[in-house]
Image: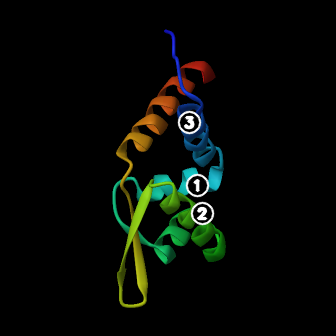
Amino acid sequence: MEMVLTPNELEALANRFKLLAEPARLQILAALCNQERSVQEICDCTGLQQGNVSKHLRLMKDAGAVTCRREGVWRYYRVIDIELLALCAHVHQSSIKYVR
């Protein structure tokens, strides 16, 4: 398979993989993959600290992977880049083949 990409496309592709290159962000994505959660709920699911979760959520929101809504003082996050979840699932399934 041949891929011919422009410099802008290469940059966008690299940025998408950079987003997935941090284990904490993968934990957050896993926590959000089936439902919307508050920052506190994400912390409870992942064991990560609130400041760390907030920092990663901000990066993920800026990248267009998640969105949030405000309800009172709480913010609830959900995944909007479903293709990103599909990519994670595909890579996970193919990595299982090589671990065996």
- The residue depicted at 43 percent of the width and 59 percent of the height is 66
| Amino acid type at image mark 2 | His
Q: Are marks 2 and 1 in contact (CB under 8 Å)?
A: yes
- The residue depicted at 58 percent of the width and 55 percent of the height is 25
| Amino acid type at image mark 3 | Asn
Mark 3 or 1, closer to the camera:
3
Residue 94 in picture, x, y percent from top left:
51, 24
Give the farthest residue toward the top: 1
- The residue depicted at 36 percent of the width and 45 percent of the height is 82
Q: Residues within 10 Å of mark 2 (few under 14, many from 20)?
A: some
Name the residue that disc number 1 marks: 25
Residue 8, which numbered label?
3
Alpha-carbon span between mark 3 and mark 2 = 24 Å
Residue 47 in picture, x, y percent from top left:
61, 67
Q: Earlier in the sequence, mark 2 or mark 1?
A: 1
Alpha-carbon span between mark 2 and mark 1 = 6 Å
Dot 2 falls on a residue whose secondary structure is: helix
Dot 3 falls on a residue whose secondary structure is: helix
Instruction: Name the residue nearer the viewer: 29 or 99.
Output: 29
Name the residue that disc number 2 marks: 56
Residue 78 in picture, x, y percent from top left:
38, 62
